[in-house]
Image (tube, grey):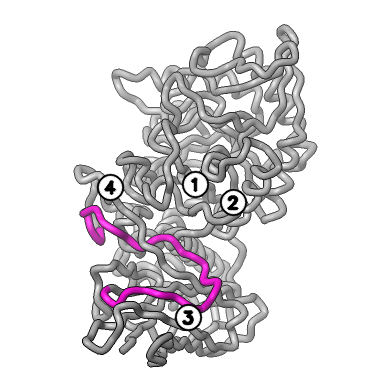
Amino acid sequence: MIRAKIISSLEKVRLINKLEDFEEVKVLKAARGERISFQVVAEDPPSKEAPRAMGLHLALRSKLSKYIKGFFVGQVPMALPAYLERCSGEYLTKEPGLIPDVLYPLKKQKYYTQTYSLVNFWYTVELPEDLAPGKYPVCITLKGVKDGVNAKVRVVIEVADAVLPKSDLRFTQWFHCDCIATHFGVKMQSEKHWKLIEKFIETAAHTGINMLLTPIFTPPLDTAIDSYRKTMQLVDITKDGDAYSFGFEKLERWVSLCKKYGITYFEMAHLFTQWGACATPKIEALVDGKPTRIFGWDVPSDSPEYAAFLKQFLPALLTELDRLGIRENCYFHISDEPNISPDRPDFINYGKAKELVKPLLKGCKIMDALSNVEFFDNGLVEFPVPSTDHAAAFLERDIEERWCYYCCSQGKLVANRFMSMPSYRNRVTGLQLYMNDTVGFLHWGYNFYYSRHSEFVIDPYLVTDAVHAFPSGDSFSVYPYENGAIESLRAVVFYEGLQDRMLLKALEEKIGKEAVKKTVREIAGRDVPFTECLDAKTLVAIHDRVLELLA
């Protein structure tokens, strides 16, 4: 006999679980315009009479049905749950195994499964802003295909008389165009590639991303020394002796696509190589009519030739950004994750690079992910993006825009979206961003479908750790699917965290920032630094209390 429950989006249903492991959710509270999710978990315990295969018809009834989308939650392999020497705080498991993550769209309300494990479905409700406040029941019937036995579950969505505001957070996850081309087997920058890029941009916007890494030339990221990723360059360059000319038609197309889906901020590809600015990025130009690589690993960052190129390129680029009307919303990078250590000259290299480009980018914002506050203290970067476990020192400084990021190394105490972590450790990020007055968040892995250093292509459905390089889930949050991308439950839960922040900002307009923070502290029982992760019940309690105060 089929049994089922509606459970929170903050649960992860593993195949080793039993139905009794989960608490039933009966009421969900939301603002108008908010996107909320819940899960239906079902089982059909084996018996002598029951066939081994369980077929299900799913039927949903609600006045909100046209705003509800259903998904089947797929399990994926998790070979590297965490860096064991660098992990603490709550984890679901630190053992390899299968983990729920990919959300397959339910095209037909029918699904077959085995009786010996749980099956779960994900439902997302996108409430319109003009919806009348009130209580809206959602009823789902699970009917056995062969025996006709039903299980019925029900949740009530209470819509408050409050509207979710538009986010003012600048949120970027690095967009890897070459990974799209290699997975789908299309030529770089062909029309097929551009169509796929558009689909991935559309999905990015749906997950809350409003800033996109813009490949004015191939981003020098996650690339093994002396090797190169496929060319993704939006600026056409022609070299004639020491003179350069530039074509920006592809960049204009890129900006137009971004604006189409509400992405309004742009971060230009890094001007120097990752981890210390030791060399120049891969840049191609027409030389005597032939496509030629003119810069790369073999050209040092302090090369006079590269300086001469930048002195022609950057003014031309700024003129184009002015023409496109986006210059004020653009951010530039020097080098990703420079460090300070005795065996690395990052500090010196970064300083030289910054000295070169600063007069060429006068008035522009220059940002970089880094963890040493000395880069800010010495005036090398005005917009530092510290990792969350190093953010405390930066919070003590007077910084115009506070940003932060996390990646594979942030596994101790702080929030992250590793597959092995409970979902509350993902969602809490939004609350932490608000409580620490942070206006920007960066993550490197929107769709990185390569091994470490981009040495070879992987299948994200089979390899979720870039081949034992990063904790599973760090390198991507969407999956390639048909002619576009589908979201992971981690991406959906992270967006729930962004909405928490948006509601807190709305309440701030009503009662003031300090009153909002006091309310959060009262419910949490403590402050909420980046090194404190609140549990699921506390996050929901804060969310619901904010709704009450707004309404």
Mark seen at residue 200: 2
- With 397 as the anchor, is 305 left or right in this view? right
- The residue identified by callout 1 is 447
Asked if the stretch drawn in magenta spans residue 101, the answer is yes
Please tell me how many numbered marks the rendered image carries. 4
- With 411 as the anchor, is 395 left or right in this view? right
Magenta residues, start to end? 90-116
Q: Residue at x 64, y 82 (%)?
A: 131
Q: Residue furthest right?
A: 323
Asked if the stretch drawn in magenta spans residue 168, the answer is no
- With 206 as the anchor, is 394 left or right in this view? left
- The residue identified by callout 4 is 80
- Residue 5's spot in the image, x, y percent? 35, 83
Dot 4: element: loop
Amino acid type, label 1: Asn
Question: Which one is nearer the viewer's eye here, 356 or 45?
Answer: 45
Mark nearer the N terminus (1 vs 3): 3
Mark 3 or mark 4, whichever is nearer to me = 4
Q: What distance separates the C-alpha of mark 4 from that of mark 2?
A: 26 Å
Q: Residue at x 31, y 89 (%)?
A: 1
Mark nearer the N terminus (1 vs 2): 2
Mark nearer the N terminus (3 vs 4): 3
- The residue identified by callout 3 is 29
- Determine whether label 1 and label 2 are within 8 Å by CB: yes
Number of other residues with Cα within 10 Å of mark 1, as a class: few under 14, some 14 to 19, many 20 or more: many
Amino acid type, label 3: Lys
Q: What distance separates the C-alpha of mark 3 from that of mark 4?
A: 36 Å
Question: Which one is nearer the viewer's eye here, 309 or 62?
Answer: 62
Question: Which one is nearer the viewer's eye here, 5 or 531?
Answer: 5
Instruction: Identify whether 236 is placed above or below 421.
Output: above
